[in-house]
Image: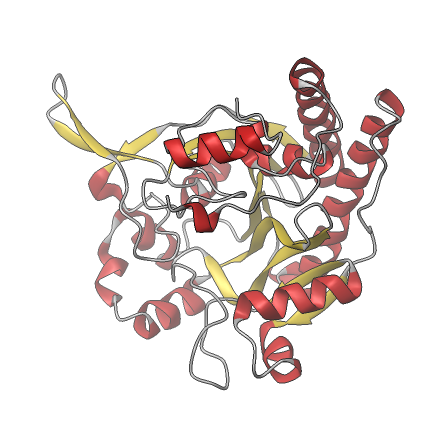
Amino acid sequence: MSLSKVQLPEGYRPVLDILQTEIAIKLVKDTFERELAQKLHLTRVSAPLFVRKNSGINDDLNGVERPVSFDISDIGEEVEIVHSLAKWKRLALKRYNFGPNTGLYTDMNAIRRDEELDNLHSVYVDQWDWEKIITPETRNEETLRHTVRRVMRALKETEEALHRANPEIEPFISEKVTFLTSQELLDRYPGLSPKERENAAAKEYGTIFVMGIGGALSDGKPHDGRAPDYDDWALNGDILIWYPVLDRAVELSSMGIRVNEESLRRQLALAGCPERAKLPFHEMLLNGKLPLTIGGGIGQSRLCMVLLHKAHIGEVQASIWDDETLKACAADAITLL
């Protein structure tokens, strides 16, 4: 990682020391997990660290990232460490016989070898991956917006609990969400890049949900990449907040209503990979054997970093960084775990 990717905020000093930080991390994780499960009617289930390579279950993220793979000698098969559990969760909902408006969440751990490392990104990913069943009648934008607001309520209650335990950590996140489509952002800020548009909108509104990510906009380009086989590109989005410590927008969650038979076929064709329809997961979905769902991922370390007012994700997560970054962060009062 080149040092240019690491932002060193001028005058930064952590609010909590390293031991206080570890205690606060536990509080944040316990509180948010409980609040999220309660507000979305979710039950915790066990989740895999790796899946069979030819199953089609692994999340292709933006479609270009390479998964970490290895063979299991006793089985004689190649497996992949998960990128996320977007498709696995949908299978699990069917397996566990969940009903409408109920679902599951997991503690997901992953390795993303091609991640560009900076203040917000690590090769080690830990997140709450959640998924719940919806009906044909509730498979709409209203459900998406309602769910976003419930996630934000869980986040605010966690922030308030952290403040009660550590009064020196002042709450700052706006619970009010401004919903904007990715096309609206392009129309408002035509001369800016997608990330610059997010920064401009988050700075203006505090908390935003950018809807409709994956499909081409009026300029012929998508706002951001999304694999064609989990989110419906018309019914998904990202929650972003304005983060004053780094003076930029920070994404806290990517989520959305998942593809049905129609949107899966359409998006596979648009992405130029219709052959994926023959994979086991995709065949089940196209044959109507999987439930309609909404789901998302919320980064655990990312959330802890923001709520604890940290400048670098390495302050709340043990990972690997290059020597230049380690030295620069140490000189700037940024203690990486």
The quadrant of the picture occupied by the N terminus is: top left
Query: Which residue is at the far front?
Result: 331
- Image quadrant assignment for residue 43: top right
The answer to whether residue 12 is left or right of residue 270 is right
- Image quadrant assignment for residue 168: top right
Q: Which residue is drawn at 39% across and 52% down?
A: 61
The answer to whether residue 249 is left or right of residue 121 is right
Whole-percent x, y for residue 251 in the image:
61, 51
Q: Which residue is drawn at 25% across and 67% down?
A: 274
Q: In this view, does 103 lie above or below 288?
A: above
The answer to whether residue 111 is left or right of residue 182 is left
Colouring convention used in this rendered image of the protein: secondary structure
Q: Residue at x 38, y 69 (%)?
A: 267
Say how many tags the image has.
0
Whole-percent x, y for residue 121 in the image:
48, 42
Taking the image as drawn, is residue 106 in sight?
A: no
Whole-percent x, y for residue 122 in the image:
45, 38
Q: Is residue 151 above or below residue 160?
A: below
The answer to whether residue 193 is left or right of residue 59 is right
Q: Is residue 317 above or below residue 132?
A: above
Q: Residue at x 27, y 60 (%)?
A: 277
Taking the image as drawn, is residue 196 in sight?
A: yes
Whole-percent x, y for residue 211 in the image:
61, 66
169 or 284, nearer to the observer:
169
